[in-house]
Amino acid sequence: MKMATTAPAQRTDHRLGFTTLHREEALDRLPVSGALPDWLEGSLVRTGPAGFEIGERPLRHWFDGLAMLHAFSFANGDVSYANRWLRSEAWRDAQSGEMTLSEFATDPCRSIFRRAMTMFSPGVSDNANVNVTRLGERFLSMTETPMPVEFDPRTLETVGPGPVAEKADGLLTTAHPHHDHRRDALINYATRFSRTSTYRVYARRADEATRRVLADVKTCHPAYMHSFGMTERWVVLAEFPLVVDPLRLAFSGRPFIENYRWEPERGTRIRLIPLDGGEPLGPFEADPFFCFHHINAFERDDGNVVVDLCAYEDASVIDALYLDPLRRAQKLPGVRPRRLTVAPEGGAVSSEELADTDFELPRINYRRHNGRPYRHAWGVRADGAWLDTVVKLDVHTGEVAAWSEEGCFPGEPVFVPAPGAGAEDEGVLLSVVLEPDREASSLLVLDAATLTEVARAAVPHHIPHSFHGQYFGAV
C-alpha cells in the first residue's frame, strides 16, 4: 500500500496556490491527524485551475488555468487521494505549447476576421475548471461554456465530452446548475448571443436525450451571471449591470470578459421563471451590485421571494482576480452576504445585509434546504490578502463563527450531513487548505456546528487554489 510522505519545504505564502502543479498522484492512504468520522463513506471531488502557462505563454487570469481533478475518498476511517489533469481538448492543445481556444481572459492570437468567424461558428473551450456535478450515472466537470467533460469518479480518467447544449442554447452557461429533487432534473440556463440575445432556462433529466426548455428571455445587452437561484417554484435570474454588446464579442479583438462593461445606471434586474411552465415575471429592479455566487433562495408564506447572495459593490473583483495582482498580494474587494426580498405582486425589491462579515464561496445543507427556508451557511473570507478564514453564518440572527490558523488558506467548505442528522448543521465541513510552510496542502475536516477541527489529512504537494467541488456518496 502506497503511503503519502511530506518533504521538507521552504516558507512561502498564499501565492504558492497560483503556481502550476505538474505531478499526478494516486495514494491509497494519507496520514491523518485526529480521527475521521466512521460514517464518512464517499468522495470529495474538486476541479480547479492547476496549470498557469501554456508553453512559454503565461495565462492571465485565475479563471483561465488548465483544469485538474482532485479526489479525497473515505472508507473505514481512512482517506485516499488522487489527482489527474482533465484531458480536455484545451489540455491536449496545451501539450503542444499552443493555445487554440479562448479562455475567460486569455485569447489565442487571431485576426479580426478569424474572431468574427469564431463568434458565429465557435470553437469554445472545454477547459472545465469550475465545478463538478452528477447527471444520473455520469460525472461531469463544468465551466462557463456549454462543453462539460465526463470523467470516471473512481480513477479520475477523462471519459470524453459530456452532454453538450443544443446549438441554439448559446455559448455561455453556468457551472452552478441546481438539482431539482422534486422533478429529478438539473436546472440551468445558457445565453445565446445575437442582435437580440436570449437567456434560455432549461431542465435536463438523466433519462431523457434532450432538455426541456422552461423559458426564453430576450435581452439586448446580456449580463454576466456566474450562478442563479432556485426556489421550489421559481428559477431566479439576477441580471447585474455587467453587460456586453454582442457585436463587441465578435469584433473587439479582446478576450471574452474584457468586452463586458459596468453600467450601474441599469441597476440589478431580478427575473422569476416558473419551473412548471408559464410566463416569467419581472424584471424587478434593485440597486446595482455584482455577484458571483447565490447562497440560497426560497419563498415566504406571503408569496414573496427571498434571494440571498454574496454581493460586491461593483464588478472590480474580476480585475482583482487577474494573476498579476493576485501574485502581488493585493487585498480583495469586500463581499457581503446580502438578502433581496422580491414582492411579485407589487414589484418592489428590498435589500439588507445579513451580517457584518465578508462571505464568499458559500455552501448550505443543500439536499435538505436548497430552495427552502434555512438558517446556516458556510463560506470563506479574506482577513489578510487572500482567503484565510472559514465562516459560519446564521442568517436568522447575523451571528458569525470563524475558524482560522496562522499561515493557512482554506478553500470552499463543503458540508456533508451526518447520517440521520436532526439539526441542519449536524455534520462536517471538508475544505482543502494550503499550508505554505510545508509547501503542501491538507484536507481539513471541521465540525460544521462548532467549527472545531475534527481531523486533517496531509497531501505531499500543494494543491492550487481551486473553485468548487461536490461530495458524492460511495460510487
Image (spheres, rainbow, N blue to C red):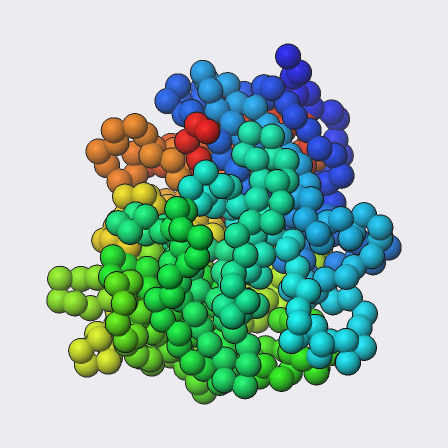
Q: Quadrant of the N terminus?
A: top right
At x 72%, y 37%, the residue is 11
Q: Position of residue 183 (x, y in %)?
A: 29, 51
Q: Is residue 326 above or below residue 368?
A: below
At x 68%, y 41%, the residue is 85
State the image quarter where residue 471 is shown: top left
Specify the farthest residue to the top.
1
Lateral position of residue 163 relative to residue 38, left or right: right
Q: Position of residue 170 (x, y in %)?
A: 53, 69
Q: Position of residue 130 (x, y in %)?
A: 56, 52
Q: Tell me, yes or no, if residue 377 can be seen here.
A: no
Q: Position of residue 29 (x, y in %)?
A: 58, 19
State the image quarter where residue 416 is shown: top left
Q: Tell me, yes or no, if residue 445 can be seen here.
A: yes
Specify the farthest residue to the front.
209
How many numbered discs sit on the rendered protein? 0
State the image quarter where residue 231 is shown: bottom left
At x 22%, y 75%, the residue is 344
At x 50%, y 84%, the residue is 196
